[in-house]
Amino acid sequence: MLAGVARDQACHDAAVSRPRIDGQRLALIPLPAAAAAALPAGRAEAARMIGAILPDAWPLPDLLGVLPMQAAATPDQERFGIWLIVERETNTVVGDVGFHGPPDNGRVEIGFSVIADRRRRGYASEAARSIVDWAIGQPEAREVVARSETDNEASARTLAAAGFARVGEREGLIEWRLARR
């Protein structure tokens, strides 16, 4: 019995130390590894661990292949993985933003998506600005990059609004860069 209490306390302590970004309308929180492991089949369990409502539309298909990497992350590694975009007013996950891994020579790459019924509200821009500000504040990150499809004007607007500069195009993707200010 005491071992179970200690394990539960350790899980609680790890959750307390996770970063959280509170914006005007959104909260960004790293997706806990245990919740990532439960998804997509264990939605109720994942929602309980996250402490937010998971709409049927989330996670989007492009995130499914990344969930196993997040599920294997330590609490320290979670912060450079998937972050949930939670609409504060409804406590609902409306998308995700995050990193393609930890900094590599000071560089991190971000990506983002918002569920269809919450698009065109500025959520992606708010989340991208918030995660970029957080990343640039980390001592191991000096530069944030992103890529968007050439025909995805919404992503291009989001990245420009977050302060990124277009730096080139390769393999059908626009490359974006933002350096520490």
Image (tube, grey):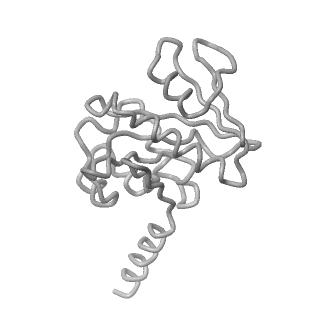
| Looking at the image, residue 56 lies above or below residue 23 | above
**Nearer to us in this view, 118 or 30:** 118
Looking at the rendered structure, the number of numbered marks drawn on it comes to 0
Residue that lies at the very extreme toward the bottom in this rendered image: 2
Residue at 48%, 69% in the rendered image: 14
Q: Is residue 15 left or right of residue 137?
A: left
- Give the image location of residue 74, x and y in percent: 54, 59
**Nearer to us in this view, 79 or 143:** 143
**Nearer to us in this view, 94 or 32:** 94
| Looking at the image, residue 105 lies above or below residue 73 | above
Residue at 56%, 36% in the rendered image: 110
- Give the image location of residue 84, x and y in percent: 41, 47
Q: Is residue 146 left or right of residue 151?
A: right
- Give the image location of residue 152, x and y in percent: 46, 17
Based on the displayed image, in which of its 4 quarters is residue 109 positioned? Answer: top right
Residue at 39%, 37% in the rendered image: 123
- Give the image location of residue 170, x and y in percent: 65, 14
Residue at 31%, 43% in the rendered image: 40
**Quarter of the N terminus within the rendering:** bottom left
Residue that lies at the very extreme toward the right in this rendered image: 105
Residue that lies at the very extreme toward the front in this rendered image: 24
| Looking at the image, residue 4 lies above or below residue 133 | below
**Quarter of the C terminus within the rendering:** top right
Q: Is residue 3 left or right of residue 136?
A: left
| Looking at the image, residue 28 lies above or below residue 17 | above
**Nearer to us in this view, 147 or 134:** 134
